Image (spheres, rainbow, N blue to C red):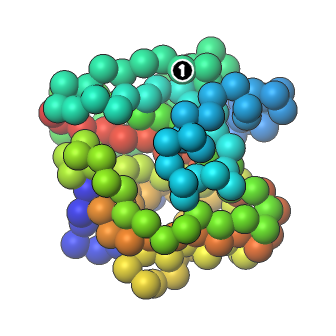
Amino acid sequence: MLLETPTRNLGPVDHMPLKQAVEAAPPEAWFEDDVRQKSFEQHKQTRSLVMLFSTTWPNPQVQQRSGWKYFAEPATALMNEIVAAHYPPGGRVIRAMAAKLLAGSRIALHKDAHPSFAAAHRIHVPLVTNPKVDFVIRGLSHHLEEGSAYEVSNLDYHAVTNLGPDRIHFIFDYTLQ
């Protein structure tokens, strides 16, 4: 969704149950679903634990993916907390994943192009981050703090560089359509 500002800080959230579950995931879980890496060139240097995913629009067909079996409970609790506090009821989550940007890697400058992004709120919750992550939106650097939720203007050009250890964000898309 295109926002008036590059990010909207939604404030602190109870991220620890999901963070602990993600950190406890077996290493091979990060390779079970590579839909994002195959579909989007800019995500080649990432790994994903994909929980929910839809590419159809305007009638999203949401699939439970491999990450759902590991994280359904803590992810649902976190999404419900954020949606209840900041968005109208009656919508649905059409994508949810934990995304790892590997140490020394980057996500190239891009803007999200799928038509659903014009209607969906893109929420990031940093689960693991470091001061050497540079998240640039509209040419401005942003440091997203662990344990806070942010809505990101993903229809603007954005890129991420990680010069520190692995960074992990929980990302989900909520739409009323």
Q: Residue at x 75, y 27 (%)?
A: 29
Please indicate whether residue 103 sits to the left or right of residue 69 in the image: right
Q: Name the residue located 41 percent from the left edge and 50 percent from the top edge.
A: 123
Q: Residue at x 63, y 39 (%)?
A: 48
Residue 70 falls in image quadrant: top right
Which is more toward the observer, 33 or 137? Answer: 33
Q: Quadrant of the N terminus?
A: bottom left
Image quarter in which the C terminus is found: top left
User: Label 1 is placed on what type of residue?
Assistant: Arg
SS for callout 1: loop
How crowded pointer 1 is (Cα within 10 Å; few <14, some 14-19, many 20+) is rated as some
Q: Is residue 24 left or right of residue 109?
A: right
Residue 26 placed where, x, y %?
Answer: 83, 27
Q: Quadrant of residue 153?
A: bottom left
Residue 86: horizontal and vertical position, in percent? Answer: 29, 47
What residue is disc 1 on? 65
Q: Residue 38: image x %, image y %?
A: 57, 40
Please tell me which residue is depicted at 78% across the width and 68% down the height of the picture. 104
Residue 147 seen in render: no
